Image (cartoon, helix red, strand yellow):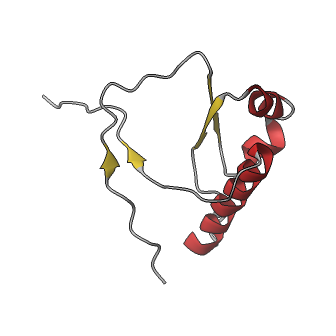
Amino acid sequence: MRPPPRPAPADLGEAELTHLSHADAVAHPDDDLLFQSPTLLDDVDSGECITSIFLTSGDSGAGSAYARSREVGNQAAYSQMFGVNNTWTECVVLLSKRERD
């Protein structure tokens, strides 16, 4: 079974992070939940915009369905922490383009 196609890149123009933004990069989905507490909960309580960057899918060779289940679990956890419905919109964000010589 193939994973669903990824959405097209979003054009965010000149979007800027505000001082009320928090970003963290972790190896796998759910590492933020396991290793960023209690800082993560403090950020949630403060109302900050939180961006989590996962460097790998964390599939452990088990395939895309397992990797997706970890991603869905993270989404459910964030929805629970923020007290909102577990409804997400996915997009691909192109952060920069590199011109080649």
- In this view, the residue farthest toward the left is 101
Q: Quadrant of the C terminus?
A: top left
User: Is residue 83 or residue 22 the one in the foreground?
Assistant: 83
Q: Position of residue 32 (x, y in %)?
A: 73, 41
Q: Where is residue 86 in the image (x, y as percent from the top left)?
A: 67, 59
Q: In this view, does 20 lie above or below 26?
A: above
Residue at x-position 67% and y-position 27%:
48
- Asked whether residue 36 appears in the rendered view, the answer is yes
Q: Position of residue 34 (x, y in %)?
A: 82, 44
Residue 74: name its quadrant: bottom right
Left or right of 85, for residue 15: left
- In this view, the residue farthest toward the top is 19
User: Is residue 74 or residue 55 the one in the foreground?
Assistant: 74
User: Is residue 65 or residue 15 the one in the foreground?
Assistant: 15
- In this view, the residue farthest toward the bottom is 1
Residue 27: name its quadrant: top right
- Asked whether residue 30 appears in the rendered view, the answer is no
Residue at x-position 75% and y-position 44%:
82
Residue at x-position 66% and y-position 49%:
28
Q: In this view, does 98 lie above or below 34?
A: above
